[in-house]
Image (spheres, rainbow, N blue to C red):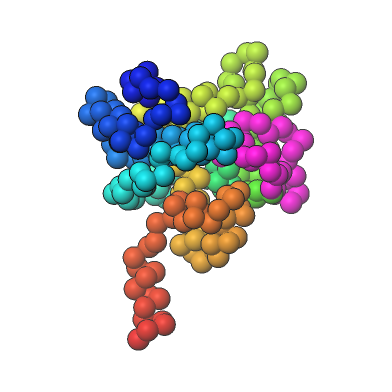
């Protein structure tokens, strides 16, 4: 931005930033979402400059949030999850899919888990989420059975809960998990198979079946409830039933 505007930071004004955002969008053919993300980055930066008394007033203040079309993010159907599970030739992959489906854990949290973090008796474990905040997550009986089977078949001494399929059986990395799930999806001709989609699916199902949004927020480890709401898709049939229950 500074290279294009060619002005000292103290003299950058609102019109400069508006012009830059317009040219950025035209040059890169970006969506409104991307441009608003750039605006938010500038807002944080200039707010910091203002707080530290490098500038008198942030020039980004008069550039408001760019309105975007709300995208309804997809979730996995029960049928799709069963197809993924049935396609697994490795017990690790089956345990991985079950764990993601049951817990809604972030993939970054999952790869940090160790075997001794798991309480099979209580079907729970402690994860460290964003900001090093810890929380309990829970898994179902099917996940427990496949996770126990996977761990019993391992011959390595790695402390990690999930490891690579090949020697030297290093801890599974985020990219490794993503690549594996994409491959399983491609083999089934499924589009956009990604770890985060399991998280969104779990949250949507939980709220759709009546879990209070505050509990879903805690389960997912969200600092703000607005974030939790973004993960949910309201079932229209439930809206109809609620109307009959509360209005009719």
Quick check: can you spot residue 54? Answer: yes
Indicate the position of residue 164 as horizontal and vertical percent values: 59, 21
Q: Which residues are magenta?
A: 106-135
Quick check: 150 left or right of 64?
right
The total number of labels drawn is 0
Quick check: 213 left or right of 63?
right
Quadrant position of the N terminus in the picture = top left
Residue depicted at 55% across the width and 65% down the height: 212
Residue depicted at 59% across the width and 16% down the height: 166
Does residue 1 show up magenta in the picture?
Answer: no
Between 125 and 82, the residue placed more toward the observer is 125
Indicate the position of residue 78 as horizontal and vertical percent values: 42, 50
Q: Is residue 185 above or below residue 155?
A: below
Residue depicted at 50% across the width and 45% down the height: 199
In terms of image quadrants, where is residue 34? top left
Does residue 113 show up magenta in the picture?
Answer: yes
In terms of image quadrants, where is residue 148? top right
Q: Is residue 108 above or below residue 78?
A: above
Quadrant position of the C terminus in the picture = bottom left
Between 146 and 160, the residue placed more toward the observer is 160
Indicate the position of residue 156 as horizontal and vertical percent values: 71, 20
Indicate the position of residue 213 as horizontal and vertical percent values: 54, 62
Quick check: can you spot residue 71? Answer: no
Q: Is residue 238 above or below residue 152?
A: below
Q: Is residue 66 above or below residue 188?
A: below
Residue depicted at 30% across the width and 36% down the height: 15
Quick check: 88 left or right of 70?
right
**Which residue occupies the extreme top position in the image?**
168
């Amino acid at each position: 931005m500074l290279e294009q505007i060619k002005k000292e930071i103290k003299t950058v004004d609102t019109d400069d930033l508006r012009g830059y955002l317009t040219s950025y969008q035209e040059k890169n053919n970006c969506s409104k979402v991307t441009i608003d993300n750039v605006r938010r980055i500038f807002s944080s930066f200039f707010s910091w400059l203002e707080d530290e008394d490098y500038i008198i007033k942030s020039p980004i203040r008069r550039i408001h949030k760019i309105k975007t079309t709300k995208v309804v993010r997809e979730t996995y159907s029960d049928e799709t999850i069963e197809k993924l599970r049935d396609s697994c030739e490795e017990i690790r992959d089956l345990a991985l899919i079950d764990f993601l489906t049951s817990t809604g854990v972030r993939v970054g949290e999952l790869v940090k888990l160790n075997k001794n973090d798991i309480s099979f008796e209580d079907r729970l474990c402690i994860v460290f989420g964003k900001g090093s905040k810890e929380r309990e997550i829970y898994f179902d009986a099917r996940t427990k059975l496949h996770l126990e089977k996977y761990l019993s078949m391992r011959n390595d001494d790695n402390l990690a809960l999930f490891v690579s399929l090949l020697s030297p059986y290093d801890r599974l990395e985020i990219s490794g998990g993503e690549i594996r799930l994409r491959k399983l999806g491609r083999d089934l001709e499924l589009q956009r198979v990604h770890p985060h989609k399991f998280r969104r699916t779990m949250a949507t199902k939980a709220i759709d079946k009546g879990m209070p949004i505050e509990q879903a927020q805690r389960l997912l480890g969200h600092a703000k409830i607005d974030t939790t709401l973004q993960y949910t898709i309201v079932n229209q049939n439930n809206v109809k039933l609620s109307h009959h229950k509360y209005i009719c």
